[in-house]
Image (cartoon, grey):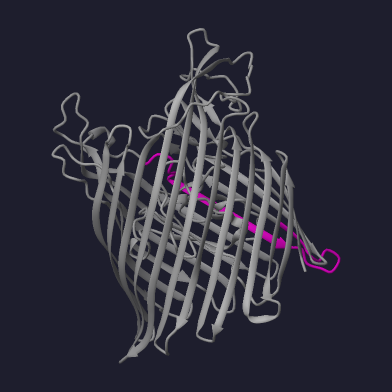
């Protein structure tokens, strides 16, 4: 697909099984669902490494311009990456140093005063074949949908490749990203009739103009090392250290009985996160008898320290019929309310076996140990998690012909779970397990691929109310279960002048076990039963119009429900389009998202919904030389 994307959600929204960014035009981070389960920034790997976040607002983000590609690992993936969502992971690959010369400048402009400039350069360092480099950088500025809100981003990522000999290659990486969002960057709210602000514009800014906002500054550095030992063994070691500093100034409000006065409260969330990850593994390839083996054995370790500060206080009232922002807020000191250390160690083993000329079997297992120790210095309350989990995966592929390959697989995942039951017994990790059956068809002499998959995915050990609870007790037990069963169809076809990408998803995601009888059978919040997409890009033939191309796509998002299934959002069809032209080293692309400015909601609460992205126009000029 040639469509220009600005973030992770846009990169995956045409994929089967993905409901991209439930919070519409919220620009702070990505919250998407994969196969019915939340998979956002906290379940994203970059170059195979996953960094801890703190589960609140201090969350990593990654600029897509600095990425070579974005992939989706669907279903439980803890065997490879440790604790993660049962829905899967987003796997991003950065632009790496290359011996081929890379020179690119990109300029963008669009609606909402969108402005962006980026550069991507790389190649050999002063003609040294063993030393290569890459530098990507970007500066972006745009207005956000709510009144008096805007966003600014600065990004730079240098990397250096060194090959001291024919058997060793190491890439040193660094990354810096800074976001400043006036007003917090939150999605627009659509107020329902039972909300006190029903009838007011969703663009109404209830904060304090000039004060409220979300700021994130993050950096990381590390290396990727590959070394060939002999004809059998190759060793790999990857390391990354990073830090996120986040400050979130937000405002809460309550409309008074006079129907016009807002009593407002200011909040400061100030968070710092330091984290690092080591992953060391060996890869062995050999033939034993009639079986070809490719085996992995490794150990990875993740560590994080975080500090959270928080405070709230009353600020000046606001008359919603006569918006008189003061433009300033006298800040209150935010004390530390939580400090924590977390670590996760995993040992894993995998063997991929090819035999019989047509069969490929993969078996893998992993043992993880997770520990967290946290404390609230203000109260002395402590949080302790000490859990371990074994996860496995097995798969079998049969290459029936050179074109047709059916497969079957089983995989598991886990996620650490805090808290304890009424007897102070610590909870176990929540677990995921999936059975999948599918087929892939790649016709010969054609650039095309068709896939189909059916799966049964379950998240278990889910917290549900303790049946022994009295009126004022709120203990939980781990007997709940959420199930997602589905069908996914995808097609990618490249013809001489036409590229097609299509997907369809049928998904039944619901609560199947709960001690609260009314919850059993409820559909998972925000997950459509059906979704589909189609994107087509056509290159106009002929010499007079050489370089001209037209792209168009539609995305269908089926009806979704509020958590209690009392609010239902109707389905929607959103259209996108692109016109692009290439000439003399330049590529121009005009992208229009939501061409017909369809008004819809991506998420629902009991009294308000979250607005989807409105029409957005973006012109991109890219020069390569």
Quarter placement of the N terminus: bottom right
Segment colored magenta? 524-550
- For the point 54% across and 40% down, the residue is 24
| Residue ranking furthest to the top | 258
Q: Quadrant of residue 49?
A: bottom left
Q: Nearer the viewer, residue 174 or 189?
A: 174
Quarter placement of the C terminus: bottom right
> Residue 246: where, in percent of width, then height?
50, 42
Q: Is residue 442 left or right of residue 112?
A: left
Instruction: Decide: is 123 above or below 137.
Output: below
Q: How many marks?
A: 0
Q: Is residue 483 left or right of residue 109?
A: left
Instruction: Decide: is 105 above or below 310.
Output: below
Asked if one can make out residue 122 in the rendered structure from this viewpoint, the answer is yes
Q: Nearer the viewer, residue 45 or 517?
A: 45
The stretch drawn in magenta includes residue 361: no
- For the point 67% across and 65% down, the residue is 498
Q: Nearer the viewer, residue 211 or 281?
A: 211
> Residue 348: where, in percent of width, then height?
31, 69
> Residue 557: where, in percent of width, then height?
51, 44
Instruction: Decide: is 543 above or below 191.
Output: below
> Residue 551: where, in percent of width, then height?
69, 56
| Residue ranking furthest to the bottom | 289
Q: Nearer the viewer, residue 51 or 193?
A: 51
Q: Is residue 137 left or right of residue 331?
A: right
């Amino acid at each position: 697909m040639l469509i220009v994307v600005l973030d992770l959600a846009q990169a995956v929204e045409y994929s089967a099984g993905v409901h991209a960014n439930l919070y519409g035009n919220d620009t702070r981070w990505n919250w998407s669902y994969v196969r019915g389960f939340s998979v956002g920034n906290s379940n994203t790997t970059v170059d195979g490494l996953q960094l801890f976040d703190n589960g609140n607002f201090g969350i990593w983000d990654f600029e897509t311009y600095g990425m070579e590609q974005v992939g989706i690992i669907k279903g439980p993936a803890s065997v490879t990456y440790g604790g993660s969502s049962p829905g899967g992971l987003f796997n991003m690959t950065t632009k790496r140093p290359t011996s081929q010369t890379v020179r690119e400048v990109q300029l963008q402009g669009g609606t909402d005063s969108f402005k962006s400039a980026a550069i991507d350069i790389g190649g050999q360092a002063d003609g040294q074949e063993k030393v290569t480099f890459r530098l990507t950088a970007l500066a972006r500025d745009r207005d956000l949908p709510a009144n008096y809100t805007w966003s600014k981003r600065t990004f730079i990522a240098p990397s250096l490749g060194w090959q001291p000999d024919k058997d060793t290659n190491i890439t040193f990486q660094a990354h810096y990203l800074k976001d400043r969002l006036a007003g917090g960057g939150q999605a627009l709210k659509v107020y329902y009739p039972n909300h006190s602000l029903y009838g007011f514009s969703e663009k109404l800014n209830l904060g304090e103009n000039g004060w409220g906002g979300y700021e994130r500054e993050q950096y990381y550095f590390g290396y990727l090392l590959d070394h060939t030992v002999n004809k059998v063994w190759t060793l790999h070691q990857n390391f990354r250290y990073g830090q996120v500093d986040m400050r979130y100034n937000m405002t809460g409000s309550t409309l008074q009985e006079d129907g016009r006065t807002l009593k407002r409260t200011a909040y400061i969330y100030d968070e710092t996160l330091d984290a690092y990850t080591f992953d060391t593994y060996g890869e062995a390839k050999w033939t034993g008898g009639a079986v070809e083996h490719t085996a992995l054995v490794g150990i990875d370790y993740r560590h994080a320290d975080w500090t959270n500060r928080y405070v709230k206080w009353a600020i000046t009232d606001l008359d919603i019929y006569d918006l008189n922002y003061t433009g300033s807020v006298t800040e209150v000191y935010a004390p530390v309310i939580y400090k924590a250390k977390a670590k996760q160690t995993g040992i894993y083993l995998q063997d991929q076996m090819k035999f019989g000329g047509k069969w490929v079997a993969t078996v893998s297992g992993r043992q993880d140990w997770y520990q967290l120790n946290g404390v609230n210095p203000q109260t002395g309350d402590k949080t302790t998690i000490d859990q371990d989990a074994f996860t496995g995966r097995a798969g079998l592929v049969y290459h029936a012909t050179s074109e047709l390959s059916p497969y079957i697989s089983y995989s598991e995942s886990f996620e650490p779970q805090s808290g304890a039951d009424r007897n102070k017994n610590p909870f176990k990790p929540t677990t995921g397990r999936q059975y999948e059956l599918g087929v892939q068809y790649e016709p010969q002499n054609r650039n095309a691929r068709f896939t189909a998959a059916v799966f049964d995915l379950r998240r278990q050990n889910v917290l549900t109310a303790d049946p022994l609870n009295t009126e004022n007790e709120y203990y939980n037990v781990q007997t709940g279960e959420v199930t997602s069963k589905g069908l996914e169809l995808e097609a990618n076809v490249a013809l001489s002048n036409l590229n097609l990408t299509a997907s369809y998803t049928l998904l039944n995601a619901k609560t199947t076990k709960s001690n609260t009888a009314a919850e059993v059978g409820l559909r998972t919040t925000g997950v459509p039963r059906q979704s589909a997409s189609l994107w087509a890009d056509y290159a106009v033939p002929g010499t007079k119009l050489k370089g001209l191309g037209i792209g168009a796509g539609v995305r269908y998002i089926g009806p979704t429900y509020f958590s209690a299934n009392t609010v239902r959002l109707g389905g929607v069809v959103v259209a996108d389009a692109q016109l692009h032209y290439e000439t003399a080293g330049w590529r121009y692309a005009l992208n229009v998202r939501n061409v017909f400015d369809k008004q819809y909601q991506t998420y629902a609460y009991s009294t308000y919904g979250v607005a989807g992205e409105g029409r957005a126009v973006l012109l991109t000029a890219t020069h390569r030389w």
